[in-house]
Image (tube, helix red, strand yellow):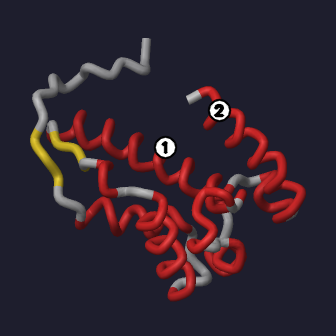
Amino acid sequence: MRTLLSVLFASVIACTSVAGEPLLSQGIGASKCGDLAADIKPAEGLFNQVNLMLYAWVQGYVSAANVALLEYDSKHIDMTDLDASRVLSMILDYCKANPDKRPGNALDAFIKTAKKSKAQWKTGTVEWDE
């Protein structure tokens, strides 16, 4: 885990210098699909810095969505099938078809249609407010 975090941190630094100002100032999720699509290289897997950053961002986005889903309806999405290959292909396909949108729009569509499983969850478990 520590190695993955080190690689991710190094990749973020490298991405900001390779991909330019938008990733540095806004983050990958705020990038327009038209700008991002050219940098996604599924064949390179997580060895590609943009791929790694995108994959980590997607994992966080869907994890956050799971917390919201659990709080709302005690359901969640099983993230097991969201491997790097599937994530990169899903975002790339969406971005090619929707260059004016953002990668979060692809994930919103995925979350809406993904199979959700019921979990034992007590609403109000997450207390972010004092």
Q: Position of residue 5 (x, y in %)?
A: 64, 34
The local crowd at label 1, few if under 14, some if 14 to 19, many if 20 or more residues have their Cα within 10 Å, is few
Front residue of 56 and 112 = 56
Categorize mark 2 by other alpha carbons within 10 Å: few (<14), some (14-19), many (20+).
Answer: few
Q: Residue at x 31, y 59 (%)?
A: 111
Residue 67: name its quadrant. top left
How many numbered circles are shown? Answer: 2
Look at mark 2 in the image and give the residue it sits on.
Answer: 3
Q: Is residue 74 above or below residue 85?
A: above
Q: Nearer the viewer, residue 35 or 86?
A: 86
Identify the residue at image location x=70%, y=41%: 7
Q: Is residue 8 above or below residue 50?
A: above
35 to 50, vertically: above or below: below
Q: Which residue is mark 1?
A: 60
Residues 63 and 53: in front is 53
Quadrant location of the N terminus in the rendered image: top right
Q: Choose top left, top right, bottom left or bottom right for residue 31.
A: bottom right
Q: Is residue 25 left or right of residue 107?
A: right
Nearest to the eye among marks 2 and 1: give it: 2
Residue type for callout 2: Thr
Q: CA distance from mark 2 to mark 1?
A: 18 Å
Q: Who comes first in sequence, dot 2 or dot 1?
A: 2
